[in-house]
Amino acid sequence: MTIRYGLNNFKDNNGNGSLLLLQPMETRAVRFLQEPGEMAVLRRHYIKGAGYIHCNGSGCPLCQKASDEWGAPITIARDYFLAVLIDRTDDMVRVFEGGKTIKNKLLNFSRVNGLTEIDFNLRRSEGKKGKDLYDLIPIVKAPSPLTKEERERIKEVALDRLLKRGEKTNEEIEAILEEREAS
Ligand SMILES: [Zn+2]
């Protein structure tokens, strides 16, 4: 498994973001704790019944079986990023898992101002075929850079653990595939 850093490393494909925290049509005020260049990017497949599994790159058994069709049992490898943020609704530090649809918005905002300079409203709506769409609306008051204490809060989330979720060796993946075929 390869974790890369920086949204400029993000390869566009059909992957959409998923954010477990937001209900459809819900909006939350957030403050990002990382600029896009600091965000972890990972590549993974989705297997029905087994969840997300990291793509092992060349020689990945899932790449050989993957399909890009809607509802495919094993999807092609897609890039996701993990962005650490402060959720202003309850002041908890959380991780937003995003995909293609919101990546460019983050990059564009960070080119104009630092992404960590202001709060944003993060909004979830429903896209085509029930896929989630996320939008990012800047809350512009006066600029209020992160304080040193707020910056430190990035340590409150177990980012390493989240990044390793779905990590399997090719042998483990083969075992999952065999089990699927047997059932
Ligand atoms: Zn793969």
Image (cartoon, rainbow, N blue to C red):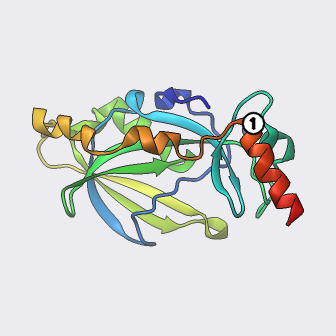
Say which of 53 and 149 sits in front.
53
Q: Give the quarter of the figure containing the C terminus.
A: bottom right
Q: Which of the 4 image quadrants contains residue 34?
A: top left
- Nearest the eye: 54 or 117: 54
Q: Is residue 70 left or right of residue 111?
A: right
Q: In this orientation, does residue 105 appear?
A: no
Give the total of numbered labels. 1
Q: On screen, 54 above or below 122?
A: above
User: From the viewer's perspective, is residue 78 above or below residue 7?
Assistant: below
Residue at screen point 53% across, 46% down: 165
Q: Amino acid at mark 1?
A: Asn
Can I make out residue 145 in this image? yes
Residue lying at 35% horizontally and 33% vertically, measured from the top left = 110
Horizontal side of residue 124 vs 63, given as left or right: left
- SS at badge 1: helix
Indicate which quadrant contains ligand 1. top right
Quarter of the image where one finds residue 61: top right
User: Looking at the image, which is closer to me, 63 or 119?
Assistant: 63
Q: Position of residue 31 (x, y in %)?
A: 25, 47
Mark 1 crowd level (few <14, some 14–19, many ≥20, 10 Å Cα): some
Residue sitting at x 12%, y 40%: 144
Q: Residue furthest right?
A: 182
Q: Is mark 1 within 8 Å of ligand 1?
A: no
The picture places residue 82, in percent across and down from the top left corner, at: 44, 42
Residue located beneath label 1 in the image: 170
Image x and y of residue 23, in percent? 42, 71
Q: Name the residue located 80 percent from the left edge and 44 percent from the top edge.
A: 174
| Quarter of image, res 123 | bottom left
Image quadrant where one finds the N terminus = top right
